[in-house]
């Protein structure tokens, strides 16, 4: 009796054209973290507008139905991939800060991480966040909000390191800490854009050296 009733439910059509069976919970047969990392790399290398659903289905290693069931559409997946990128970078930066090294050395390591994470060992594609800012953020409020949040978080991390360095006497400048944090954050963004066209370490070494000299 129960089996027959359950089979009957599978075929009852909902007004939307769906069936009760079609909306029953599905068990994911893939690693969502791995899928988001793959999506991040696809969008990162191709850009949002040039990436098709066919590109995603072929590159993610999951079925089209799983893709739509989990992420609904390309934009939703792009947002999750961008959030994943933001989280990974934040964790890397926080790991460096938690070592409690000298302020200037900490700032140098954070800046170098942001650059080598982009240009080291792969085709120059720039920073995924910067790419999204240029290509998508001007007409997409959700992307714009995430990009702004990313830079606010980075600026706050720089602020904390600089302020701590001042209190320890490691940073002597009397320049306003907030202004310094904004300046360094903007310098990082500029280097991330530069990384789209060159991976010459000497170029970035010169810029980093001059940037950190503002703390003297």
Image: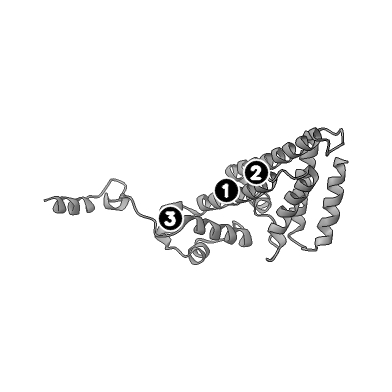
- At a point 42% along the width and 63% down the height, the residue shown is 63
- What residue does disc 1 label? 83
Q: Residues within 10 Å of mark 1 (few under 14, many from 20)?
A: some
Q: Secondary structure at mark 2?
A: helix
- Left or right, 148 with respect to 168, comes to left
> Which image quarter: residue 50?
bottom right
- Asked which secondary structure carries label 3, the reply is helix
Report, in whole angstroms, how far the alpha carbon at label 2 lies from the one at label 3: 27 Å
Front position in the image: 123 or 165:
165
Closer to the observer: label 2 or label 3?
2
Which of marks 1 and 2 precedes in the sequence?
1
Instruction: Residue 211: give x, y in percent of width and height.
Output: 84, 47
Q: Is residue 46 left or right of residue 104?
A: left
Sequence-first tag of 3 and 1: 3
Q: Are marks 3 and 1 in contact (CB under 8 Å)?
A: no
Q: Earlier in the sequence, mark 2 or mark 3?
A: 3
Q: Position of residue 214 (x, y in %)?
A: 86, 42
Give residue 210's position: percent from left, percent from top: 87, 49
Which quarter of the figure is the C terminus placed in?
Answer: top right
Q: Could you give the CA–CA distance between mark 2 and mark 1, rounded to whole angstroms? A: 9 Å
Q: Which residue is mark 2?
A: 150
Q: In the figure, is residue 160 to the left or right of 4?
A: right
**In what element is the residue under mark 1?**
helix
Q: CA distance from mark 3 to mark 1?
A: 19 Å
Closer to the camera in the image, 64 or 109: 109
Q: Quadrant of residue 171?
A: top right
- Say the numbered circle drawn on residue 68: 3
Q: Is residue 160 above or below residue 114?
A: above
């Amino acid at each position: 009796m129960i089996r027959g009733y359950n089979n009957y439910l599978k075929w009852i059509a909902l007004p939307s054209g769906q069936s009760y069976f079609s909306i029953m919970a599905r068990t994911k047969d893939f690693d969502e973290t791995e899928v988001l990392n793959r999506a991040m790399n696809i969008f990162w290398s191709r850009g949002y507008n040039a990436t098709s659903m066919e590109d995603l289905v072929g590159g993610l290693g999951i079925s089209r139905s799983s893709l739509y069931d989990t992420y609904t559409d390309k934009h939703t997946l792009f947002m999750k991939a961008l959030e994943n990128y933001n989280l990974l970078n934040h964790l890397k930066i926080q790991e460096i800060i938690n070592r409690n090294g000298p302020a200037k050395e900490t700032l140098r390591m954070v800046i170098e991480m942001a650059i080598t994470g982009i240009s080291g060992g792969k085709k120059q594609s720039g920073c995924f966040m910067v790419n999204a800012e240029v290509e998508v953020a001007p007409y997409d409020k959700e992307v714009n909000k995430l990009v702004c949040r990313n830079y606010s978080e980075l600026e706050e991390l720089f602020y904390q390191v600089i302020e701590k360095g001042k209190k320890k006497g490691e940073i002597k400048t009397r320049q306003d800490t907030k202004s310094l944090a904004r300046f360094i954050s903007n310098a990082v963004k500029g280097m991330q854009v530069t990384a789209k066209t060159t991976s010459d370490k000497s170029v970035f070494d010169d810029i980093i050296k001059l940037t950190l000299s503002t703390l003297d």
